[in-house]
Amino acid sequence: FSLTFISISRVINFVSWNVKGLGRPSKLNKVITHLDSLQAKIVFLQETHLNVSDHTKLRRRWVSQSFHSLFSSRARGVAILIHKDISFKPSDVQADRYGRYIIVSGLLFNTPVVLANVYAPNFDDDNFFIKFLSVLPNLHSSYLIIGGDFNLCLNPQLDRVSQRGTTLSKSAKIINYFLNDYAVTDVWRFLNPSTHGYSFFSHVHQSFSRIDYFLIDNKLLPWVQHCTCNAIVISDHSPLTLGLRFECRCTQRPLWRLNVRLLTIEDFVQTIS
């Protein structure tokens, strides 16, 4: 008998969030609960501040897979969490030893993807971005989805409210070159071309800015359903949500029936007996 393939359309919610440390069990519980309320299915976390043994704590309730890069219990650390309802088969993982990025390649509902989560330095370090972008795997055969805290403004005039200048940083120039050269898009800005929007509040400078991004392959743009900067809660960063509609191909097996004509064949009946 043959298999029947059924294509089901489904919106997958991605969330990127700098959580400013998950060392306290009470905060970890609040973060996991809030992600669940956002209907998060694939999560990019920055500044987890966890040790190797602590990362097992992330696999709770709705989380079935977790991938991480750590540095110390007091700084950095990134993780990608996969919901138990999501069909994801990883094929390769690249983890930065300094806890700055994690890159996971695999099949998401049979669609080849590269999931990259980044926590950039909080100063203008263009060499970091050159290195990070250079280690991304071959993007011709996979859809790229980058999320994270880039600690920069790609459009200072629209992405920042402060008395600081509007000069584009060296790191921002590197990212903009990458977007143009590799046909990648800042999703939120694509949906809000002239809107002021912010994802981070600096207590030091008393200013708002948009430094958290989802950058995706242009071929994914028709799949985009929404991209939203949510309220700033728990952390001083907003959880950024991205909805992508995936075509999930699943198989349906027909009911098996015995071919009764086989029972007229003596050798077959003896074998089965």
Image: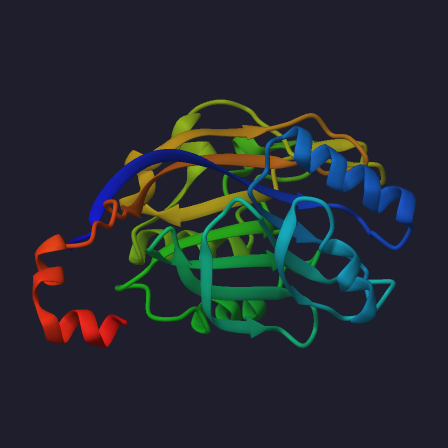
Q: Position of residue 271 (x, y in %)?
A: 22, 76
* Residue 84 visible, this angle: yes
The residue that appears at 78% across and 71% down in the rendered structure is 52
Numbered label tally? 0
The quarter of the picture where the C terminus appears is: bottom left
Image quarter of residue 16: top right
Q: What is the quadrant of the N terminus in the image?
A: bottom left
Look at 55% across and 42% down and name the residue there. 41
Question: Does 231 appear above or below 95?
Answer: above
Residue 103 is situated, as x and y percent measured from the top left of the image, at 52, 65
Residue 84 lies left or right of residue 174; in this view the side is right
Q: Residue 86 location in percent, x, y?
A: 49, 47
Percent of width and height locating residue 140: 26, 64
Residue 169 lies left or right of residue 90; in this view the side is: right
Q: Is residue 18 left or right of residue 212?
A: right
Q: Residue at x 42, y 51 (%)?
A: 176
